[in-house]
Amino acid sequence: MDKLILSGGTPLCGEIEISGAKNAALPILCAALLTSEPLELSNLPRLKDVNTLFMLLEQMGVTQKAGEDARILDASGVNNPIAPYDLVKTMRASILVLGPLLARWGEAKVSLPGGCAIGARPVDQHIKGLQAMGAEISVEQGYIHARATRLKGARINTDMVTVTGTENLLMAATLAEGETIIENAAREPEVVDLANCLIAMGAQISGAGSDVIHVQGVEKLRSARHRVMPDRIETGTYLCAAAVTGGEVRLTRTSSASLDVVIDKLTEAGCEISILPDAIHLKAPRRLKSVSLRTAPYPAFPTDMQAQFMAINCVADGVATIRETIFENRFMHAVELQRLGADIHIDGNTAMVRGVPRLQGATVMATDLRASASLVIAGLVAEGKTTIERIYHLDRGYEHLDAKLAALGASVERAGCAHLVIPA
Ligand code: EPZ
């Protein structure tokens, strides 16, 4: 079982490149199912989750080959519209094949993703929206069985803002007959990136990035090239790591466009941040000021940055209130941070974090992707050695994390089984 061993106390300094966005790459890879022509994707991050999705698509009959700093996917030979439990259980975003399979093949058998550490994470809104478009859907033996001769455009209003729910319905609507209107749509930048890829493939979409998306169905989609957007959560994670260690970093191949609220919070905490055309420069103060936050759908504070901000608040000057409104169990990192000496009090979906002068290194356990990132950030500033176990969670969402941290001067070592080998 891989572990990460960190020795805290070194300010992070230097420059690293940000990778493509995991949460844009996953739906965009599924969009390849919507056409029989090649889809060329660049800036795909080398992540475990991306690999898992490649395996799932290949099981369905999608082929892929390397292009010029890109992967070229071809779904012309798909003959097995099934997403099996053994793959879906390791990567919930596999549910994103449901809409495309229904739209292009008229049938799909997709395992229910099941819950995960941060919550039950049902997919009822995905199902409800597809049923509104005429799909016949039953759930038997843990699988979603879906059929539709041809999906029909519909007006859909999701009960809550759902990112992958919006993405599934958006992809399904591109080939449906007539117009689909998705109300209460997710506004996340990753939804916009997916829409831009679909438009390049010939889809007729307007309103992506707003809470009402209009889609005029077309007969078929065509070949396209698309460059995946930079990962805003990876960007925010490294900004937090530099901020808490009193460092100075430049993150390149990224954009601040979708990070305003995170940048505002780091500025409020005392960081000097300058925005460059495709980079962000941060200079941290000696000690951060506590900053309170409340997560909510974009453009509000992203839930995927909540754990990282809990970590930096652990040693900040003051008391911070953190309210998590998206997932019912997304404070799993708190007990691990307490093992490092953090002063955190949890009351329902609210955490009260009182900054302490310093954390002490210890062995801690990663429970989910962003909780793991929070432990890395804490380990970078804790006195002595911090060993983080079960770091396979990290490899799901952070490309070459140990190498990038080492490039910024961190003392970090990966121990345990063989390195995660991800094809170039
Ligand atoms: C996406 O998950 C992201 N994953 C998550 O990032 C992110 O935390 C989340 O959006 C919120 O921003 C990907 O994009 C692959 P939701 P998703 O549907 O789409 C409830 C990470 O760390 N809900 O927006 O699964 C749900 O339980 C991951 O990179 C229903 O009840 O999240 C949650 O409480 C973690 N029924 C809320 O809505 C549904 O049918 C928002 O979930 C769908 C969702």
Image (cartoon, rainbow, N blue to C red):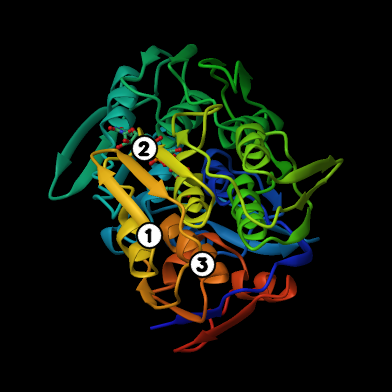
Residue 214 image position (x, y, % from top left): 54, 13
- Residue at the spot x=44%, y=32% of the render? 294
Look at label 3 and name its amino acid.
Answer: Val
Look at label 2 and name its amino acid.
Answer: Glu
Alpha-carbon span between mark 2 and mark 3: 20 Å
Q: Considering depth in this image, is 7 or 51 the residue closer to the camera?
A: 7
Label number found at residue 324 = 2
Q: Tag 3 or tag 1, which sits nearer the N-term?
A: 1
Label number found at residue 368 = 1
| Whether residue 270 is situated above or below residue 172 in the rendered picture | below
- Residue at the spot x=56%, y=26% of the render? 299
Q: Tag 2 or tag 1, which sits nearer the N-term?
A: 2
Q: Secondary structure at mark 2?
A: loop
Instruction: From the image, tell me which residue sits under label 3.
Output: 376
Q: Considering depth in this image, is 201 or 369 the residue closer to the camera?
A: 369
| Proximity of marks 1 and 2: CB atoms separated by less than 8 Å | no
